[in-house]
């Protein structure tokens, strides 16, 4: 049987690992104390094994060990000299600081960030898109309330369920996390809104869980524009009120200038903002009114609405990660082990996003992630196969349809 036209001398997984610099990973680990008293299972081995497990969606340390030994011959390409037993991997997840893998993720992100978006002026994107940052958080449910403080109560047992909250920031034209922070699920989102982290003329969008008058005032002083959804129970003074008809599907829009006042023990806080109310249709065709809040008084109402609608991009990202890399089973019970697995999941998401942007053929993220999982240890060219996946099939069909060669009598 002829070899595939996509055949290459390295497994697909090795081609993904080529995005990393092994020496850089080891230096990052050494700088943060990750190689102290380590004889064999260094940070590179740790990354390769954990990324392999997450890519294949393995559920336990036992499955990881069994799968590694089943592919032992193919792992020669990876330069792995030592295959860990379950206790070795468990100890590494418990002891090697999770921030090392956070540094690996950020190093990979900074190295290939230019491949995540297009700066072409003719791509038809609005001017504000390049400066737009979106912040939000997602909660990953855990098995215990002892590791991270949970929130809410189970309606049947009355017990809290543990959880870790992943505070995420993305650039709207990149669609991968550019900054990550972990807290317990019980922590409030508004603590993650830190005005000092943003500079003049930056634009941020977030939901109403982040509303804080004092921080809004500080953002305004720094020249940072924010767009958020307004809560229904906020008290304010109306300064100006205007209604006008938009040319888009939003119909009549109400634009108000309002003033918030909050009295605290230390000081009185005043914040002037712009409230934009528009009509929005639900999936069932019903009309609902949505009020947005911003400190920008120059952009059109259409742009403000478009900016907030773009905020849903981060919700789609959370859904993408949770559907393609289910974080239901963890390879350790410690907080450090859980954070390591989340960082590895984010690294896997970034790698597949880079592959998706590199190939010319259009793939959905879930379709591409599934095919990579199936072919992870196969000797196929990642570029060739995903651009022309039917080439081998077309060749076989051509061979079957071709008439048989006539035998010569002489």
Image (cartoon, rainbow, N blue to C red):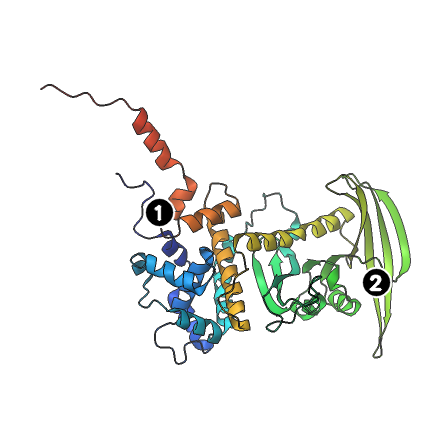
Mark 2 vs mark 1: which is more N-terminal? 2
Identify the mark at residue 380; answer none if there is no mark: 1
Look at the image and tell me in which quarter the N terminus lies: top left
Taking depth in this image into account, of 52 and 228 the one nearest to the observer is: 52
Q: Name the side, left or right, on which 257 lies relative to 384.
A: right
Q: Name the side, left or right, on which 292 lies relative to 309.
A: right
Q: Position of residue 184 (x, y in %)?
A: 64, 70
Residue matched to label 2: 272
Q: Position of residue 180 (x, y in %)?
A: 59, 65
Picture quadrant of residue 252 = top right
Picture quadrant of residue 155 = bottom right
Q: Position of residue 296 (x, y in %)?
A: 77, 57
What kind of element bears circle 1? loop
Identify the mark at residue 216; answer none if there is no mark: none
Q: Name the side, left or right, on which 179 lies relative to 128.
A: left
Q: Is residue 71 visible?
A: no
The relative height of residue 99 versus residue 121 in the rendered view (above or below) is below
Taking depth in this image into account, of 6 and 219 the one nearest to the observer is: 6
Residue lying at 53% horizontally and 71% vertically, measured from the top left:
333
The relative height of residue 67 versus residue 244 in the rendered view (above or below) is below
Q: Name the side, left or right, on which 295 lies relative to 1.
A: right
Residue lying at 27% horizontally and 22% vertically, measured from the top left:
403
């Amino acid at each position: 049987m002829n070899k595939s036209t996509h055949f290459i001398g390295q497994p697909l997984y090795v081609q993904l690992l080529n995005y990393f610099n092994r020496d850089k990973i080891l230096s990052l680990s050494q700088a943060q104390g990750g190689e102290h008293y380590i004889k064999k299972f260094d940070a590179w081995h740790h990354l390769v094994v954990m990324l392999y497990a997450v890519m294949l969606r393995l559920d336990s340390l036992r499955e990881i060990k069994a799968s590694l030994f089943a592919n032992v011959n193919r792992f020669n390409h990876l330069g792995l000299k030592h295959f860990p037993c379950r206790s070795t991997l468990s100890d590494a997840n418990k002891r090697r600081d999770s921030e090392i893998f956070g540094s690996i993720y950020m190093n990979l992100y900074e190295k290939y960030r230019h491949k995540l978006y297009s700066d072409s002026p003719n791509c038809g994107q609005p001017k504000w898109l390049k400066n737009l940052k979106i912040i939000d958080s997602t909660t990953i449910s855990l098995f215990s309330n002892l590791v991270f403080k949970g929130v809410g109560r189970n309606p049947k047992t009355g017990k809290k369920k543990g959880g870790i909250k992943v505070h995420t920031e993305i650039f709207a034209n990149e669609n991968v996390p550019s900054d990550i922070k972990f807290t317990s699920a019980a922590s409030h989102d508004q603590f993650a809104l830190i005005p000092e982290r943003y500079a003049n003329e930056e634009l941020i969008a977030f939901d109403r869980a982040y509303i804080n008058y004092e921080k809004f005032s500080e953002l305004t002083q720094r020249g940072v524009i924010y767009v958020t959804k307004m809560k229904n129970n906020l008290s304010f003074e109306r300064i100006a009120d205007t209604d006008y008809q938009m040319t888009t599907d939003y119909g009549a829009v109400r634009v108000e200038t309002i003033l918030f006042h909050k009295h605290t023990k230390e000081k009185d806080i005043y914040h002037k903002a712009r409230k934009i109310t528009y009509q929005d249709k639900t999936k069932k065709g019903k009309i609902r009114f949505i009020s947005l809040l911003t400190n920008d008084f120059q952009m059109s109402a259409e742009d403000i609405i478009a900016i907030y609608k773009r905020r849903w991009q981060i919700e789609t990202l959370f859904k993408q990660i949770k559907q393609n890399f289910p974080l239901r089973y963890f390879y350790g019970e410690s907080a450090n082990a859980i954070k390591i697995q989340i960082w590895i999941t984010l690294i896997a998401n970034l790698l597949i996003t880079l592959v998706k942007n590199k190939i010319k053929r259009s793939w959905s993220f879930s379709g591409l992630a599934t095919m990579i999982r199936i072919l992870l240890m196969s000797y196929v060219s990642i570029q060739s196969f995903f651009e022309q996946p039917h080439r081998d099939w077309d060749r076989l069909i051509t061979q079957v349809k071709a008439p048989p060669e006539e035998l010569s009598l002489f």
